[in-house]
Every structure is written in C-alpha cells, then in structure tokens.
C-alpha cells in the first residue's frame, strides 16, 4: 500500500549515507589507527557534493570509534562539526563477527545508541544518525501501486471463494452470504 504521496517525511534516497559495509569492504579498520580518512560523495555527473573526514581509534573496551570532522553549510553560515561515533562487534553466524555503528543522536536528551549498519545525514541536518531518529522513509514506501491493489483484491476474492466452497462441503451452507431477514 505505502505511505500517502503527500507525506512530508524525508526519504533515505535524499540523504548522505555512511555505511559500515562500505567501510569493511574498503578495509578501513585494518589501516593504521588515528590516520585521517576522507569519504567523498559525488552526484551522477561525478561532481563532489560532500566530504567527511574521520579518524579511527579505539575506546576502553577495545571497540573502534570514528571521530567525524566536517563543516555544515546553510546558505552563508558554516558550522564546523566534530563528534565521535562508537562501534560494537557482535557474533554473526558460527565464527564471524559483524561490526555495527551505535547511533550518536539523542532524542529529548535520551541517547539512541541503536545498533545500525548505516548512518544518514538528511538535508539541513548537522549530525549523522539512524533512520528511526530522523524518521526517514524509503521512496518505495511513499509510492502507491494500483497494480498491487488489484493483485491484493484478486487474491482476497480467491481466498473467499475457496473458504465458501470449503464451508459448503462441510455442510455449513452459505454462512457468509447475507440474507434479507434479520
């Protein structure tokens, strides 16, 4: 069914995405600690639209931390932003481990610390955070498909016909049909 098309929620596709899968694939956790790494986002024509610098370190429990440092610009105003995002490692499968971000945002003063594989930076936001904290939606959730509705109606009608046939075979008659009598 999907969300109503007039929903004002920001879509994931409009955000900058910082993915743990990409970091693992690029081998950034096997590099030297405390070295500056730059992540660059480009548009479809290859032009740079944003970049974020980060350093990888370790916390007291031995997990990796990422120290983000970038500048956010709103019109003429530019604000430097610097904060730390923690990671945790959890068992996944028999021998493997999976690394997660802990969401750095706080909602009404309560830290989120949700375990996520992607952090998002929506337009006009200052900090990367999880999809739930920013109340983000997917484009496909906002689109309404008439073909899906027709398919559901067809399936519902088919199920109802089978249930009525089964009820007749069991001797229950047409119990779903309304009679004119009260």
Image (tube, grey):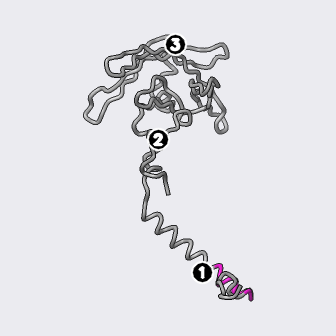
Which of 51/142 is in front? 142
Q: Is residue 93 above or below residue 66?
A: below
Q: Is residue 147 above or below residue 129?
A: below
Dot 1: element: helix
Residues under labels 1 and 3: Cα distance?
Answer: 65 Å
Mark closest to the chain's N terminus, 1 or 3: 3
Up-down relation of residue 123 to residue 161 (above or below): above
Queried whether the magenta region covers residue 165, the answer comes back as yes
Q: Which residue is situated farthest in the front direction here? A: 182
Question: Mark 1 packing: few (<14 Cα in 10 Å), some, or many (20+)?
Answer: few
Q: Which mark is residue 48?
A: none
Q: Counting other residues with Cα less than 10 Å from the Cα at mark 2, is it few (<14), some (14-19), or many (20 or more)?
A: few
- Whether pointer 1 and pointer 3 mark residues with C-beta atoms closer than 8 Å, the reply is no
Q: Give the quarter of the image for residue 14.
A: top left
Q: Nearer the viewer, residue 70 or 174?
A: 174
User: Main SS of the magenta segment?
Assistant: helix
Judge whether residue 129 is colored magenta. no
Residue bearing mark 1: 161
Question: Which percent across, then down, holds residue 47?
Answer: 26, 28
Q: Crowding at label 3, few (<14), some or many (≥20) Cα neighbours within 10 Å? A: some
Q: Name the secondary structure under disc 2.
A: loop
Q: Which residue occupies 41% across, 27% down?
A: 124
The residue tagged 2 is: 9
Rendered location of residue 34, percent (x, y): 50, 10
Which is in the foreground here, disc 2 or disc 3? 2
Position of 50 compared to 57: left or right? left
Horizontal side, residue 160 vs residue 32: left or right: right
**Residue at the spot x=49%, y=13% of the render?**
32
Residue at the spot of label 3 = 33
The residue segment tinted magenta is 163-172
């Amino acid at each position: 069914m999907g969300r109503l098309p007039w929903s004002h929620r920001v879509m994931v596709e409009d955000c900058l995405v910082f993915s743990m899968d990409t970091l693992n694939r690029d081998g950034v956790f096997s590099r030297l600690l405390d070295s500056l790494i730059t992540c660059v986002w480009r548009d479809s024509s290859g032009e740079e639209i944003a970049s974020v610098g980060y350093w990888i370190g370790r916390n007291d429990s031995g997990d990796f931390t990422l120290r983000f440092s970038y500048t956010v610009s709103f019109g003429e105003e530019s604000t430097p932003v610097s904060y730390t995002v923690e990671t945790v490692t959890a068992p996944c499968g028999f021998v493997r481990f999976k690394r997660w971000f802990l969401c750095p945002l706080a909602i009404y003063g309560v830290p989120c610390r949700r375990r996520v594989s992607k952090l998002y930076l929506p337009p006009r936001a200052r900090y990367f955070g999880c999809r739930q904290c920013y109340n983000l939606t997917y484009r496909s959730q906002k689109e309404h498909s008439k073909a899906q509705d027709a398919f559901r109606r067809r399936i519902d009608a088919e199920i109802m016909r089978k249930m009525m046939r089964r009820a007749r075979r069991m001797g229950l008659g047409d119990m779903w049909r309304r009679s004119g009598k009260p």
